[in-house]
Amino acid sequence: GYAKGTGTRDLQMEAIKLLAVNRDKQTTAAELKQIYESTEDVAVKRAVISAYQSTGDKGALVRVAETSGTPVVIRQQAITGLTNIAAPQELFALYQKETDRSLRLSMVSAFGSMGALEQLTQVLKTEKDPEVRRRALRSLGSMRTEKTGQMLVDLYAGETDLDNRRAVINALASQENAEALVAVARKESNISLKTEIVGKLRDMSSRSKVAMDYLVEILK
């Protein structure tokens, strides 16, 4: 009763949290859905979403995340809640239908947290929005593998947006991937970008023979 709003707002919020630990999950899911749909109070809706996350109710979180008329802040919380519950391909299905940039950015960040290399690759193959592409490039940079390093080098070659090229440089630097940075530097004709790459290699030269050798080479 309190969770449905018969008491004060604070009591309602606390009661919703307690419902999430109810062992009768089927009943809890139905009650939470009823509470969510019966209020316009954003704080109460967010409390219900937190309860969905606590109970691992993936279906309810997907339903909230994909409802276009729902306030973005609520949908964003649902997307965050799906990060540790949904499979990457399930979240990507939502991404493909989404038009709101902030939500697409949130999903790309979630792919990075999931280590969803396949989905990030698909984003970079199909996404036209430079900001979303930049987020995907940064997410790739957080995955320190030989495969992602080569992917970033290949993407750099075909990238026309200067900020996105910088994002690749920063991603490779965060991976401490001197080999990839040298490969990019050798083909870069833009002086400003090449200077940035050399700066990154200088910073890692005390830890990388590859970086040091390249610096010595360009000084000759």
Image (cartoon, rainbow, N blue to C red):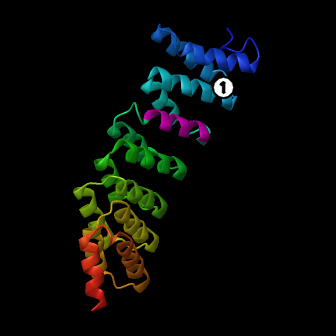
Residue corresponding to mark 1: 44
Q: Is residue 32 magenta?
A: no
Q: Please identify the dominant SS of the magenta region.
A: helix
Is 198 left or right of 98, judged from the image as shown? left
Residue 75 or 210: which is nearer the viewer? 210
Residue 202 or 127: which is nearer the viewer? 202
Residue at x 61% of width, y 26% of height = 47
Quarter of the image with the C terminus is bottom left
Observer able to see residue 164? yes
Observer able to see residue 66? no
Residue farthest to the bottom? 220
Quadrant housing residue 172: bottom left
Task: Say few, some or many: other residues with alpha carbon within 10 Å of mark 1 (under 14 / 14 to 19 / 20 or more).
Answer: many
Q: Is residue 76 magenta?
A: yes
Residue at x 43% of width, y 26% of height = 59
Is 117 left or right of 29, judged from the image as shown? left
Q: Where in the figure is residue 64, as x and y percent of width and height?
A: 52, 31
Residue farthest to the front? 206
Say above or below: 2 vs 132: above
Say above or below: 120 vs 156: above
Quarter of the image with the N terminus is top right
Q: Secondary structure at mark 1?
A: helix
The span picked out in magenta is: 73-82
Residue at x 28% of width, y 48% of height = 118
Amino acid at the residue labelled 1: Val
Is 159 left or right of 22, judged from the image as shown? left
